[in-house]
Amino acid sequence: MKELRTEILEVIRNSRRIVLAAHIYPDADALGSELALGEILTALGKEVCLYSEEPVTHILDFLPGSGRLETTLPPLSDFDCAVSLDCGDRHRLGKAADSLLTVHPFIVIDHHAGHKDFGDLRWVDAGRSSTGEMVFDLSRRLGVDLSYEAAYCLFAAIVSDTGSFKYSSTTAYTFHVAGELMKKGVKPQEISGFLFDNFSKNRLQLLQNVLATLDLYEDDRLAFIHVSREMFERTGTGSADTELFINYPRSLSTVKVAIFIKEVEANVIGVSMRAKGECDVARLADGFGGGGHRNAAGFKIIGETIHSLKMKLLRELIPLV
Amino acid sequence: MKELRTEILEVIRNSRRIVLAAHIYPDADALGSELALGEILTALGKEVCLYSEEPVTHILDFLPGSGRLETTLPPLSDFDCAVSLDCGDRHRLGKAADSLLTVHPFIVIDHHAGHKDFGDLRWVDAGRSSTGEMVFDLSRRLGVDLSYEAAYCLFAAIVSDTGSFKYSSTTAYTFHVAGELMKKGVKPQEISGFLFDNFSKNRLQLLQNVLATLDLYEDDRLAFIHVSREMFERTGTGSADTELFINYPRSLSTVKVAIFIKEVEANVIGVSMRAKGECDVARLADGFGGGGHRNAAGFKIIGETIHSLKMKLLRELIPLV
């Protein structure tokens, strides 16, 4: 485990105004880490701007403080430092990347394996379960007693990025942190309820539609599911409703790699990939301009159909499984 | 949290031959606790008989040491004490209950809320996530350093009974124990893989079929799903494959009561019910000759069809939600 650099603590302590950003299309680790750090810095008397390119989705608006997110940036010259959370790459900061990176010092806190360096001061540790776990450490080092709200956001971050302590990124230290967060009053069943049992009738219909697309290849070692615009329209759902659907093909005992192809907009396809064991999907995602972890990666692509992309991925994947 | 009674430690320390038993149709908590305690007592130089009414199923045979289970009891007069694990009731010991209870002292270790007293020395704590968590404490108090195999079984016990740290029974101490078990080399992803990612292609097809039957009533407060013989036949699955399917209708944010009607055999219908909040489905199940807890109950019935039973249940349920 990599220790937090002392310079990062010093910069934060000496800053009065701080801007925070997580990766675009944020998951609970990105957003939970940003919101928790917002709470921590506010407790230290800092003025904080919690930037997010898009407003929070209905899937994550249960996170305390999500109403504090701002979708427009104030003049960036006013800030003494910036912190990006859970961003493996400067492009994952979205449209505001260039503007945000004019703030110095720019601090980077991330746990992505394929992290590509950016910013001024980096604390990148691929051995961590989640960025949330790192923000917990940061709060300790800053001497801030976590509020219930911050603990809640960090617990959600950890639970989400470890699939509720199931993924290989889970360490003994992850459990230690989870136990400490519970001591702040966090209730696992409540957060898991929001993260995992947050189905609408429409979402359940979408799941049924998506499961019907299951296709298996290579003696069931390779699984594909997909969702089309037409399915979203028919069930009155959107891309956010497909959160965690990838776990269904992944859960097949025979499967080594599971792929979820999403027609997120006309002409725009998003792909989520999950691998078990030795298969490395981050490299594959990288080849398509995306990124992620060895066992969980993804990318977005324009000008492909679900079918044409599936054929391309099949060619790449068959030698891997 | 209730502390382990010192008499129990003394009896175990002074015994040379010990017989262990878990509840019938054992889950991972029952069997994991029994196998781990077997390991612990063997490490203390005891002769141990690990009794189980039935051989281990293919779902749990990944637990290390499951080959040590014995389905026939040796002469019970040879034992200095017996320990039952995760048994809420003497009847849950199965056919051998009367014979086993001739062994004295008979120690009972359990965490069920509705525990009905039996045996001679009881350590019953409904505040625990699992019996596995209690066996961890027992190992500490006995001064035994857990083997990798024992830690593996206890981790499986805890993960299984907390739904991977999601249920309200999960405490900060549960996380502490999980962290300690990881220090023995246990890999969460491996155990979760066996417990949760054990879907077959056929089971996923069955899920898709069952989700298609979702019907909602009373402003979506009441949800029904069902499975027919025809679906089992078409997908090559059986009743055991529907485990946890009830969680899908239950997961709908609007739902107060979720009902799963299963045509388990020709003319035999099984019903699982889940309620949230104040709704009491145990009473309803009782009226049909079944039973269970307030929020989770069920029954079996002969001579009804899926449709006729649904109509009967609807009449009973509408006033409740």
Image (spheres, coloured by chain):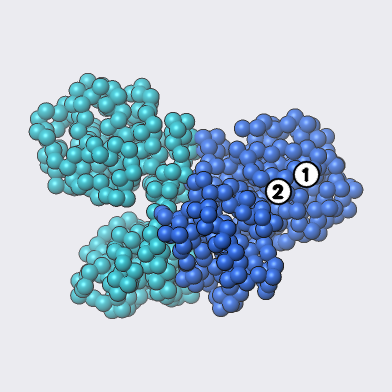
Chain colours: A blue, B cyan
Most foreground residue, A304 or B192: A304
User: Residue placed at 14% from the left, 32% from the top?
Assistant: B103
Q: Is residue B195 above or below residue B32?
A: below
Name which quarter of the figure residue B136 lies in. Answer: top left
Q: What number is the disc on residue A87?
A: 2
User: Residue placed at 31% from the left, 78% from the top?
Assistant: B307
Return the x and y of residue A63 as percentages of the image width and height: 63, 54
For the residues beneath circles 1 and 2, the answer to whether they share a chain is: yes
Crowdedness near tag 2: few (<14), some (14–19) or many (≥20) residues, C-alpha within 10 Å: many
Left or right: B82 in relation to B115: left
Left or right: B18 in relation to A201: left
Return the x and y of residue B37 as percentages of the image width and height: 30, 32
Most foreground residue, A210 or B283: A210
Q: What number is the disc on residue A118?
A: 1
Most foreground residue, A254 or A91: A254
Return the x and y of residue A227 as percentages of the image width and height: 56, 70
User: Residue placed at 51% from the left, 43% from the top?
Assistant: A168
Name which quarter of the figure residue A300 lies in. Answer: bottom right
User: Residue placed at 29% from the left, 42% from the top?
Assistant: B31
Chain holding disc 1 = A
Q: Is residue B237 above or below residue B188?
A: below
Q: Secondary structure at mark 2?
A: loop
Going by the numbered disc 2, the residue's amino acid type is Cys
